Every structure is written in C-alpha cells, then in structure tokens.
Image: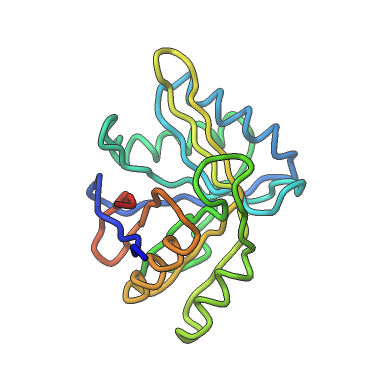
Amino acid sequence: MTTTTYTEVATAAGAWCCRVLLPETPFEAVCALLKDLTTVTGTPVTAFLFGGCGDPVAELLLVRDPSRTHGTPEIALYESLAQRLTAETGWSLAPARAPHSGVLVGLGLREGYAPDAPHHAPAEVEQHLAGHGADWSCRTARLVSARLVDGAVQWYDEVGVVVHTPAEMAPTIERIAALFAQHRYVVTDFGSGSTRALAAR
C-alpha cells in the first residue's frame, strides 16, 4: 500500500490571519459578499466560515493561500482587504482567538474534490489529535475561496475543520490529511513566519 506524502508546492513569507465578527448571517449571503469583494478588488479571498452546514455565520477567519500559478498577494494588501470588508459591511475586526504561535491549518473533510466522495466527521480529527496533549483546538468551518480567473470568479467551498496546534504536531496533521485523501492543504506557520501550500504526491 502506497503511503501519501506531501511536498511544498508554494510558499509565501509572512504568517497572517484576520478574525472577523458579524451578526448571524446566512452562509450564502456571506459567500456572495466575499465573491463581490474578489470581483471588485481582483484579490483572491480565502476564509474559514465557522459553523456546520445550515448554520448562520457569526465569525470568520481570513487567511492567505499561496499559489504556484498566481503567486500570493502581500500581507499589506490583505490588511486593506479586511478593512474594506468591515467598512462596507459594518462587521468588526477582532483579535485572533488563538495566540499567534504554532500552526493554523484548514483541513477538508471530503476525500478529494468529487461532490459524492466520502466525508469524514470533525470528531475523527479530534480523535487523531487527542493523543498529543491538550494544546490544540479543532473547530468546524466551511472552507471557502474566491479567485478572479479570466474575469470570472472561481469559487470553492467545502466543510472542514480549522486546526491550531504547536508546530511539532505538523506531522500529525499531515497524517490526518493523508487518511482523509486530501490533495492539498495550507499551513500558516506563526513560528517560522511563513505560509506554505502542500500537495499530495
């Protein structure tokens, strides 16, 4: 049996995320606003919308997603993007819930990209993390991204989890990604001050 391993396919200097609080808003409405933001600014948007399917959104986390094809906008541009989003919606920027240390990963729960592929449960991620102490968090979220390609918004969303762990637990996250047949995931590493995209090989 071949074991899936991951290799770094894109990296960007700097580790950034931005927590945004909002009144409970339907998921579809938040997605529409993020798509509009990408259309108007041309800047790709990646965000974790906390909650499960059918839940309204009251908190989201903006993050960066390095691309080998498209590159990665600078943090200053994302800071401006976050300010624009909150200014236009009345939403609030808030301090990150977790200290800026360790690694932050949005991990999908569906095997591959096919809509009818097997799905895993957030509890399965927690079970794999449970043997590594208590210094970690795992929250259900919708992982979404919008990118302008040839004048049209390329959109992706998937139910997943947002995991925050000490850096030494990165191999555990990689094993979970392999067990869940993830093709790609991104690590925001606050310790090294970098953001890395890893892909299965």
Query: Which part of the image, by quadrant, shows the N terminus?
Result: bottom left
Answer with left or right where residue 46 lies relative to residue 68: right
Residue at left 48%, top 37%? 83
Residue at left 57%, top 51%? 110
Residue at left 57%, top 73%? 126
Answer with left or right where residue 29 lies relative to residue 188: right
Residue 78 location in percent, x, y? 39, 38
- Tell me which colouring the rendered structure shows: rainbow
Residue 201 location in percent, x, y? 29, 52
Up-down relation of residue 122 to residue 195 (above or below): below
Residue at left 53%, top 51%? 111
Most extreme residue toward the top is 151
Q: How many marks?
A: 0
Answer with left or right where residue 149 lies relative to residue 22: left
Q: Quadrant of residue 170?
A: bottom left
Of residues 161 and 135, which is closer to you in this image?
A: 161
Q: Quadrant of residue 178?
A: bottom left
Residue 37 location in percent, x, y? 52, 26
Residue 102 location in percent, x, y? 36, 69
Up-down relation of residue 171 to residue 156 (above or below): below
